[in-house]
Image (spheres, rainbow, N blue to C red):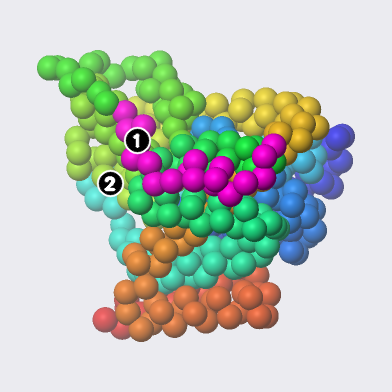
């Protein structure tokens, strides 16, 4: 599709706004995108949005950033892909880079606990809203509903996310070819993991920008899973193998990525600045996000061809329902971490009511949650 100037401007403004307000990790980011592009702007139907979630979960990299790219490509072609992806990444990268500057000059991070205290409770409600809206479209048959239950159980037991998606897709294909419920048990609670293993070296490797780029490009090209998996990759490469960071510096970098809105992969920006100041921040950020642009562009070419296959459509049905199962488990994990007292419980329940009953824009609820957190902390 040819990209009109108005379409590109709309994408730019939307994803810049989401880039400065989307707290809570990929599941929350995707929920906010669904609210904006399906319910409010009607750029996509629920089925089309679910198909993009399924396509995103099939490729490595930061899921919510890749969703932004997919939406941009669907709306305005390759220019839309570049605009939406860059607009979503840039605010978080600038904020994380600013935190890195403060960290280098003053030795610690400014407190972000007050903001996160209020925002995380709102984020739980945002994810729940997305599950309510997308669930009926994904779990449209009894076998798919049962498949979603099994995928949820597997995710709750710690089964690797990629394995769950692959097995759910395979089970859906098997059901499409031979509709018996026995195919569903392919996604039982298997124990597996893709945690990287690193061999420790005896001495630190000299730092250089090319090596920094290669480390983050490799991570961006192979990483599936949550921010905890990102932490494992970073620790393996930067602490154990190269000795460029200490454990404490790595944890501070991950905290900086979490306390800022937008993709948590901007942790790379913090680490890059820590190691190589502004050039290092740019190199690390480009390195970790560049593979995502490539994978989304490639999937945009292949997916229309593959969707003509009934087996591939069945595979995507399985991936879609498993993706929502993963989101449901994330929602429970977020709720455990976020709802810690009566105020956060009230914020979560109140936000859910405002979202589901009164259709309030989730961005304003996130802002309200941040202000409530700051005010509550100030009174203590």
* Residue 211 seen by the camera: yes
* Mark pair 1, 2: CA separation: 25 Å
Label 2 crowd bin: few (<14), some (14–19), many (20+), radius 10 Å: some
SS for tag 2?
Answer: helix
- Give x and y (percent) for residue 329: 44, 57
Pick the residue in front: 171 or 166. 171
Residue that mark 1 sits on: 193
**For this view, does 153 lie left or right of residue 365?**
left
Image quadrant where one finds the N terminus? top right
Nearer to us of marks 1 and 2 is 1
Which residues lie in the magenta part? 177-196
Q: Residue at x 21, y 27 (%)?
A: 240
Determine whether 217 is above or below 169 in the image. Answer: above
**For this view, does 355 lie left or right of residue 92?**
right
SS for tag 1?
Answer: loop
Determine whether 121 is above or below 206 in the image. Answer: below
């Amino acid at each position: 599709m040819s990209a009109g100037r108005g379409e590109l401007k709309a994408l730019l403004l939307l994803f810049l706004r989401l880039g400065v307000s989307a707290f809570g990790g990929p599941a929350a980011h995707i929920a906010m995108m669904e609210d904006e592009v399906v319910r409010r702007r009607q750029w996509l139907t629920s089925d089309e949005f679910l198909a993009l979630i399924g396509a995103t979960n099939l490729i490595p990299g930061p899921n919510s950033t890749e969703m932004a790219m997919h939406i941009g490509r669907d709306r305005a072609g390759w220019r839309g892909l570049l605009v939406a992806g860059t607009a979503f990444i840039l605010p978080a990268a600038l904020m994380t880079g600013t935190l890195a500057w403060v960290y280098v000059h003053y030795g610690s991070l400014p407190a972000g606990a007050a903001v996160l205290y209020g925002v995380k409770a709102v984020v739980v409600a945002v994810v729940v809203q997305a599950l309510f809206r997308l669930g009926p479209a994904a779990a449209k048959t009894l076998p798919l509903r049962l498949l979603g239950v099994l995928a949820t159980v597997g995710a709750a037991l710690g089964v690797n996310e990629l394995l769950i998606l692959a097995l759910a897709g395979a089970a859906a294909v098997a059901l499409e070819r031979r509709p018996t419920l026995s195919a569903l048990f392919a996604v039982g609670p298997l124990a597996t993991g893709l945690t990287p293993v690193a061999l420790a070296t005896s001495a630190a490797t000299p730092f250089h920008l090319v090596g920094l780029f290669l480390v983050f490009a490799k991570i961006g090209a192979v990483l599936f899973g949550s921010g905890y998996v990102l932490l494992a990759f970073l620790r393996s490469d930067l602490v154990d193998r190269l000795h460029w960071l200490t454990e404490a510096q790595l944890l501070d970098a991950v905290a900086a990525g979490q306390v800022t809105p937008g993709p948590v992969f901007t942790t790379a920006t913090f680490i890059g600045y820590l190691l190589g100041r502004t050039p290092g921040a740019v190199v690390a950020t480009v390195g970790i996000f560049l593979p995502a642009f490539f994978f989304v562009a490639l999937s945009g070419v292949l997916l229309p061809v593959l969707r003509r296959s009934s087996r591939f459509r069945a595979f995507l049905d399985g991936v879609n329902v498993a993706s929502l199962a993963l989101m449901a488990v994330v929602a429970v994990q977020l709720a455990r971490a976020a709802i810690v007292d009566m105020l956060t419980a009230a914020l979560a329940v109140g936000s859910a009511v405002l979202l589901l009953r009164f259709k309030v824009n989730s961005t304003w609820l996130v802002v309200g949650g941040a202000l409530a957190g700051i005010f509550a902390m100030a009174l203590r």
